[in-house]
Amino acid sequence: MPSTLRLAPAVILGKATAVASRALRLGGGTTMPGRVARAIAPDIMQRLAVRLPQGCVVVTGTNGKTTTSRLIHHILRLAGVSSVHNRAGANLAAGIVTALVQHTDWRGRPHGKIGIFEVDEATLPAVWDPLQPRAVVLTNLFRDQLDRYGEIDLVAGRWRAVLDGRPPGDTAVVFNADDPLVSEVGGRFAGTTVPFGINDVSCGTGTLEHAADSRYCYRCGVPYEYTVVYFGHMGDYRCPQCGTRRPAPLVAAEGVQLAGIQGSAFTVRTPAGAAQVRTVLPGVYNIHNVLAAAACCLQLRVPLETVAHGVETFAPAFGRAERVRVDGREAVLLLTKNPAGFNEVLRTVVRATGPAAGVVLIAINDLTADGRDISWLWDVDFEMLAGHVRSLVVSGIRADDMALRLKHAGMSGSVMTIDGDLGHAWDAALHAARNGEPVYVLPTYTAMLQLRKILQQRGLVKGFWEE
């Protein structure tokens, strides 16, 4: 059957697969519909993407993809631009096709004007040609799932191979200037580039932490010198030998005021002017996510005032500073997936608890989507929790390994409860919380999904695909 005749059956069966998956409670129907549709029409991604009147935006990187892409979607909606978006975070090729299929009619006519696609960092080369993005957002590169991706230089090499030699065309590359490796990859693109970053030394942590990855100049191998380190290897850097340095951000955060788990306020300075914004997204790492989304939307010609309003009104994505209320108590879910990200989450929790000890639930899994290798836990600075935790509950498949790491971090066994059953661990953490005291839940990716399934069954949250 010619590929043109396969499109309608592929769309119809893809939609039917999504309905069946949810009806039979086999999942959210975020991946399998795309697999079915691609089996029928292998070129369906390209055929549907090319029909989007305003093209596609791709967001990729280790951390922040879901939050950044959702924020772009939210800002564009306020600007009156409807989008096709893989909101549930299914960011491999099948997940992108699923989003396209679900947001089109049976003839393949899209319901949105532009595609906003979160893309797995290793998947970017495979989807570039089918999507032909008009904007690509590069968030950051951290060690993450070494068994799947290898070191960050391998991922950077894949990105570099995609960007090098591409004609400038209509594509813009929006990249994190505070990340040396991302800056090297994005800054060499021949077309339009938009660097973003933080210009506020008050956000600094002092020195490079143990979890820092890109410590050495990519040109001459000499250690970078930092004027300020924000977290991990993010900061204002320069090479003392060859002079390579952080490019000046076109979109920058200034005058940052951190409010712990409540978020932050800062000035976004852009070529279009400056705007004061306040976000409920906590931590310095989320400032980068806001800047990435703002830079992308400004490149798409969204007015600065609309961008600022979008930042102010944005609610966190599932598991990313999501708040769940139950029996007069509140739990805050903070996804953790690698050393640098975990450290920043811990820093946010410590700022929130201050000198008063709080309740923390840590859930560690080692399934494929988490990465099988959990040696990265020893690169996380759990020592910073000392004096800030009154009750600590440890759960997940690797609960015992996590408990051992915490013991070596100086956490007393008297404050620690180990329970591999995530439902029981949730109940124990809530029980330990005093009236009005929040519970900070720090799960890996699959542990977060498992916990939200438990909470969904209890009627406390919606399915992640419904939000």
Image (spheres, grey):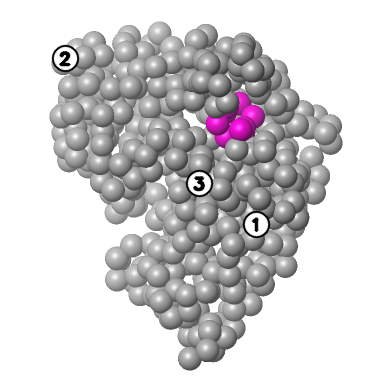
Q: Position of residue 445 (x, y in %)?
A: 35, 43
Q: Position of residue 263 (x, y in %)?
A: 56, 27
Label 1, secondary structure: give it.
loop
User: As rendered, which of 365 and 165 lies closer to the eye?
Assistant: 165
Q: Position of residue 456 (x, y in %)?
A: 34, 52
Question: Distance from label 1 to label 2 (Cα)?
Answer: 53 Å
Q: In the figure, 314 relative to 52: above or below?
A: above
Number of the front mark, 3 or 1: 3
What's the magenta region? 176-184
Residue occupying image coordinates x 50% and y 62%: 96
Name the residue type under label 3: Arg
Labelled disc at residue 133 = 1
Q: In the figure, 188 relative to 222: above or below?
A: below
Disc 2 target residue: 414
The answer to whether residue 130 is visible is yes
Residue occupying image coordinates x 82% and y 34%: 271
Number of the front mark, 1 or 2: 1
Task: Give whichever of discs 3 and 1 has the lower sequence position.
Answer: 1
Name the residue type under label 2: Ser
The residue carrying pointer 2 sits among few (fewer than 14), some (14 to 19) or many (20 or more) residues within 10 Å by Cα, namely: few
Residue occupying image coordinates x 29% and y 71%: 24
Q: From the viewer's perspective, tell me whether residue 55 is left or right of residue 125.
A: right
The residue carrying pointer 1 sits among few (fewer than 14), some (14 to 19) or many (20 or more) residues within 10 Å by Cα, namely: many
Q: From the viewer's perspective, tell me whether residue 210 is left or right of residue 50.
A: left
Residue occupying image coordinates x 44% and y 64%: 94
Is disc 3 in contact with disc 2, using a CB cutoff of under 8 Å?
A: no
Question: Distance from label 3 to label 1 (Cα)?
Answer: 16 Å
Q: From the viewer's perspective, tell me whether residue 266 is left or right of residue 159.
A: right
